[in-house]
Image (tube, helix red, strand yellow):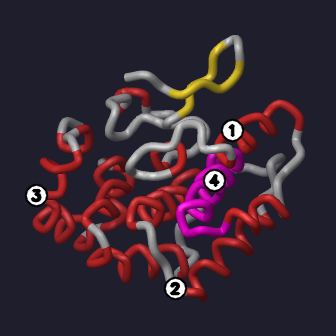
């Protein structure tokens, strides 16, 4: 858990050996060490082929499907086919469906925004009551960090043990709505 919460510079300095372990057993890494699995994207484009295959392979189901998407957000680049696949998935998420659809949709949202797809997101913005403010705030740049929109995290990261600045979402909910995290 502590490795997943390391500051960016320290984390990247050990990324090579960690990435080898993630590639060796991605399912175990995703289940046991989800923050390390996601944060490997911070190591840059050397991780892109792996996470591209993880998304395009379509084997990951349920709430874990957001993990490779968030890693891609942290990488910050993708080819046209991958961007088109993420757009397709964004438009097909059923917010009433299973597998934590809100966090999946918001993970796709921040990733597409990081990939420069703001116009697509504005055209395909979900108008769903209370969540509308979160999408609007992210599009307005609230919660932006050097890592990316909402710190390349979904609306709600359920594993709160990792709530350090390096991994916490950029916005947090309060009685007054979504506010930029101050920690």
Q: Nearer the viewer, mark 4 or mark 3?
A: 3
Q: Mark 4 vs mark 2: which is more N-terminal?
A: 2
To which quarter of the image does residue 28 belong? Answer: bottom left
| Residue 174 coordinates in the image, percent (x, y) | 63, 15
Alpha carbon separation for disc pair 1 and 4: 18 Å
Circle 1: element type: helix
Determine if the magenta segment contains residue 41. no
Alpha carbon separation for disc pair 3 and 2: 26 Å
Which class describes the residues within 10 Å of circle 3: few (<14), some (14-19), or many (20+)?
few
Q: In the rendered image, which quarter contains the N terminus? A: top left
Q: Nearer the viewer, mark 2 or mark 1?
A: 1
The residue under label 3 is 14
**Which residue is at 17% across, 57% downward?**
12
Which residue of the protein is positioned furthest toward the top in this rendering? 175
Alpha carbon separation for disc pair 3 and 1: 34 Å
The residue under label 2 is 79
Residue 137, labelled with which disc?
A: 1
Q: Mark 3 vs mark 2: which is more N-terminal?
A: 3
């Amino acid at each position: 858990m502590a490795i997943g919460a390391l500051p960016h510079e320290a984390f990247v300095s050990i990324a090579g050996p960690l990435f080898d372990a993630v590639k060796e057993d991605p399912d175990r890494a995703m289940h046991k060490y989800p923050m390390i699995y996601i944060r490997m994207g911070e190591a840059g484009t050397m991780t892109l082929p792996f996470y591209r295959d993880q998304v395009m392979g379509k084997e990951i189901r349920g709430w874990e499907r957001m993990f490779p998407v968030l890693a891609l957000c942290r990488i910050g680049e993708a080819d046209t086919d991958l961007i088109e696949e993420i757009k397709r998935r964004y438009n097909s998420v059923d917010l009433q469906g299973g597998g934590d659809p809100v966090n999946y949709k918001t993970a796709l949202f921040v990733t597409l925004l990081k990939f420069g797809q703001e116009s697509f997101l504005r055209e395909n913005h979900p108008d769903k009551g209370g969540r509308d403010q979160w999408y609007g705030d992210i599009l307005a740049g609230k919660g932006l960090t050097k890592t990316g929109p909402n710190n390349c995290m979904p609306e709600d990261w359920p594993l709160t043990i990792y709530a350090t600045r390096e991994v916490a979402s950029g916005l947090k909910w309060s009685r007054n709505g979504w506010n930029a995290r101050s920690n």
